[in-house]
Structures are given as C-alpha cells and as structure tokens.
Amino acid sequence: MGDSKEPSGRIIALAGNPNVGKSTVFNALTGLRQHTGNWAGKTVTNAQGTCRFQGKDYLLMDLPGCISLLSRTAEERAAQEFLCSGKADAVIVVCDATSLERSLSLVLQVLEITSKTVVCVNLLDEAQRKGVQVDLERLSQILGVPVVGCAARSGKGLSELMSAATEEWDGDAALPIRYPQEVESAVDRLLPLVRQQKGELSARWVCLRLLEGEKVLPEPDSRVESLLEEIWKERSPQDFSDAIAAALAERARDLARRNVTGLEHGYSARDRRLDRIFTGKWTAFPVMGVLLLLILWLTMVGANVPSQLLSQGFSWLGEELRDLFAAGNVPTWLTGIVLDGAYTTLSWVVAVMLPPMAIFFPLFTLLEDLGYLPRMAYNLDRCFQSCGACGKQALTTCMGFGCNAAGVVGCRIIDSPRERLIALLTNSFTPCNGRLPLLVTMIALFFGAAGAAGGALEALFLAGLMVLSFGMTLTASRILSKTLLRGIPSSFALELPPYRRPQVGKVLARSVLDRTLYVLGRAAAVAAPAGVVIWCMGNLMWEGESMLAHCSGFLDPFARLFGLDGVILLAFLLALPANELVLPLLLMTYLAQGSLVEMNDLTALYALLTQNGWTWVTALCVMVFSMFHWPCSTTCWTIWKETKSLRWTVLSFFLPTVFGLGICFLIATAARWFGVG
C-alpha cells in the first residue's frame, strides 16, 4: 500500500469475539509478515505483524479472541491488560455484521478503556446474503468513533479501515454507556482516588473492575480499599457485577435494535438443514465417526508415498555425507555418532512425522474453517460433562490425533483451570499420528486378511482402537475429576458459527507454518540427541553383548507380566523422543544391528517377530501399550511449558502408563488362563 521504508512506530491492536473474522482481517492486512509467541507470563498465544499503509509501517497486535474483558479467562486477562497498558495507539474491534449485538458488548467495554477505537463491522458479504443491513453512519454517530464496514475475505473495506485507524483524532468519543445510578455514584466516589494512581487513561474502567472485586491496581491503595469496604456495606461486589453485565447487555441490544435491520430472517435455512445432520440426535455421532475415519484414512494412505520419498532422499544424503566423512578421514566413532546416530534418527522422525502432519493438520483446519469443530464440541459436551470435564476437550482430543503436543497447546481454549488440567493430563490417551504406523503394521501382520474384506476388517479394527482410546479418555477424566481435580463441571457458552466456505490457501499456510513445522521442530530438537544415545547403546559392548541386549534382558521378566518382552519395553523407553522410533528400534535390537534399520517387507517382518516369540497376544498388547503409555518428550516438554509444574508433568507421564500396563496385564493374564496365543 505504499513504497516508503519509513516506519511510523505506531501500534494498532485488533480485538474481537471468536468467529468474527478477526484472524482474516489480521492476515489480510499483514500478509505473511507476522510471527506468533506468548504474552509475557502467560500461555496465551499472540500474533504480531507489520502492515504497510500509505508509505508507513504499522505494527498490528492480534489480541486473543474473547467474549468480553471481564477477566474470566487467560485470553480475556491478556487482552484487558494490553489495552489498559496504553501501548496501543489505536484499537480496531472486529464485529460480526450478522450478529452485531454480541460484538457490541465488547465494543462498549473497549470504549471504556480507550476512545482511540475503530469499529470494524466485518462479514458484510454474509450479512447481505442473509438480508441483514447495518446503518454504519448512524452507529458511528452514536458511539462517537469511526465505524467501517468490511468483507475481509475479499479485501473490501480494508483500506478504509486502515485509514480510520491511522488518522489522528482527539478521542472525543461519547460516553459509551450509563450504568444504574448506584453504579455511577460509586464510580464518581472512586474516580478522584483512582486518577491519582492510574491517570486519565482508563480510570473509569478501573473503578468498575474495583467495584466488582477485581485487583486491577498495581499497588494497593489504603484509601481506595477503605472506600470500597464502605461502598460494599450497601451492595456486594456480585451485585455490582450483575448490574454492570446487565447494563452492558441491554445497551448492546438497544444499539443493535436501532442500527440493524433484517434480523428477522434469522438462522439460514441451509445452516439449519446441515445442523440437523451434524448435530442431530441420531446422526451426529455416526457423521463424526465417518469424518474421523475419513481423515485418518486420508492421512495414512496419503502419507505413504511422501514418507517413502523423504526416506529415500535422506538415505541418499546420508550416503553422500558418509563419503564426505570418509574423504575427510573422520574417525569411525564420530561418523557413527553423527551419521548412524543423530542423522539417522532425525531423518526417521522427519520422514515419518512430516507427511502425516502435513495432511492431518490442513484437514483438521479445514473442518475448523468450515464451522464443524464447534458442533463437534457441542455433540460431545454431554459425554465430557458427565465425567466432570468440559465439552471443549473434544476439540483438544481431536487435535491429539495429529500430535499430542499440539493437543496440549490447544487446551488453552478451555476457560476453567481445573478442566484445562484434566484435558492436558488425558490428551496422551489419544494415539497421535506417530503411533499410527505401528498400529497399522501390527493390524496388517496379525489381524488382517487378503482382499477387500481384509482391508475393511483392518479399518474396523483400527476404529475399535479409536473407540477404546476415547473410552479411556473419558474414564481417566472422570477419575481425575473425582480425586485430584474435584469440582463441578462448568458450562460454557458456545455460539455455533455459520457454515463458511474455507479459504484453502490460508488454511494451508496456517496449518503448515503454525502447527506442522512448529511441532516438527520441537520433535527434531530432541530426536538428534536421542539418536546419539541409541547409537552408543547399540555399539558399546560388555561381555560380548551390546548395552541394548543387556538392558532388554534386565527388563524382560518385568515385561513378560504384561504380554511384552524386554526388547519391546526397551524400544518404547528409547523412543521417548518420538513414538515413530519404536518399530525400527525393535528391528535394531532383534537383528543386533548397531544403527536403526528399516524392513519394508511385511512377510520378512512377520517372520522376524514370530521367530522372537511374538503371537497375536503379543501384538495386541503392543498395540494397547502403544496407545496408552508415557507421552513423547515433546509432549512432556509442552505440558511443562503450559503448567510450569513438575508435579502435573510427572503425573501426565505415569497416568496413561498405568492404564496401558493394567490393560496389557489383563489381556496377558486372560490369555495364560485360557491357554491361547
């Protein structure tokens, strides 16, 4: 939008409810000139980007999406604190033209903090299709701030929006709302004292939050506290909170009623028809199951070819590096550590993890962009609530199918700290794509059959494992909610967004850059050091045997109790950096090789396993333990980063392991009793 390199130094914040197109506005204004991180001291993600307009660069801060600024969630606190800090030169509040009343409540709260506000009425194209019209000029006159209409998907109105946000103004917005007399009187009494400490910026906002009992002043003031105690003798903080919330809702309703027409058309007929399918009593769960199986099938089938190509490419590069090391007379032990250890392990992780994630995450994000994921949370809310958890855990559970670390990060969407912890601790009960190759291989070797019927049987077996995974997630959630994390399950407000045509290009960019590469980078960071340890254990000899053989022999008696053997248990332990390493570690130990090996011939693999005592019972126990064991190191690190608690990280490590060993013990004991397998 301009050619000058001159930076302006101005900061523009973007605020808005979820599902109003705030991210679309942000992406349209910044393009790919953006990066993500965490707010200081919080686990809430923020995005920053540069927007060039009329020859100047502006820094756009994408505040977390929130329903209000009443500090109930980490997202609301982060947004509130940034707005109150005064760092933003202007604030753009993105609203949904099809549901303006909901968005106006947030607009009114932002106006109480700063008058340097621009209201962006987005999704005008959808509103037009539904026959909804917004009187932008009249709304601007009432609020006393610019109101700009946009259709961010097509880029309509974005230049006008930036023009309004970057122009200088004196901040003469009208008083956004008058509260009941008892609230206004209390605010008037507090204002002189608060202004001495807070200044003019958001003193009124601070007074309102103080009346509600919130600690918003950086340093307690004895005079303010004494005055509050005097005020609360007549009305409690809860009374003030209820009065303020009711006044906000009524004012937003009045503004919408006076400035919006066509709302009588209501929810679109198309959306109602789709909801009868996706949220219907008899169709919701079958449709969810079909969609999940379709995504898993596409992920597994689609990842085969790119995984093989990546593996071949890494193998070729490895040989070239080996020739280079030989030409440079690099010591054999150093070649082994670098190439056979670190490089081979890292290439295994990338070749196996990258293709499934590059398929799964875009498919998952497409469902999110379509508007289906909130409906999935709605469908599963009753299941999770009956276990003392939150319906939003359904979304994080589904994210776990792609990567448990991503599922853990996704738990930020859960408002209640107690329920967020339950979701964090149980996410590893969901088998990520790193475990799927082992599950599929075991099913094909020991439970498959030839022909189309065999393929259907394998798919049905895998579906049964997914159902078992979901059942164990609910069981663990219920146990936690009745013991360590007691509490009443909270209800959550979930507005079902309209079905929208997904923006495929932006979906691909967001899912690949923000999710796939982020998770892969964390996995790669721990895979290379783990490869060095694995190589050393495979090549350090003692009494004629490698350390791998000694360790597996030590673990064997314990592992036999659970239908496994020492080699299997050791492979799972050494595969802590990435679950994809279990199968090659098994082959490496059984074949007594000094480095990771790959065996693509299923017949030869079946012969090798049966020669080492495997039966269908062993395979079943391996699959169960693959689904329910400690999280990978990337997930453990992510849990620690999210909780900052060693206690919860350790519990997340042992909780699924206890479940897995318990189920394996029952299977192995039953097999011994009946003399099968």
Image (cartoon, rainbow, N blue to C red):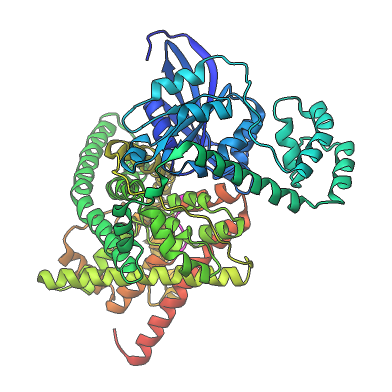
Q: Is residue 342 left or right of residue 639?
A: left
Q: Residue at x 36, y 63 (%)?
A: 279
Which one is in front, 586 or 502? 502
Q: Is residue 648 left or right of residue 225?
A: left
Per the picture, the main secondary structure of the magenta-coloured stretch is loop
Q: Residue at x 34, y 55 (%)?
A: 434
Q: Is residue 555 left or right of residue 466?
A: right
Q: Is residue 547 visible?
A: no
Residue 479 drawn above or below residue 540: below
Q: Position of residue 574 (x, y in %)?
A: 42, 57
Q: Position of residue 293 (x, y in %)?
A: 27, 62
Query: What is the magenta range?
Result: 629-634
Q: Residue at x 43, y 65 (%)?
A: 380
Q: Quadrant of the C terminus?
A: bottom left
Q: Is residue 111 visible?
A: yes
Residue 535 drawn above or below residue 332: below
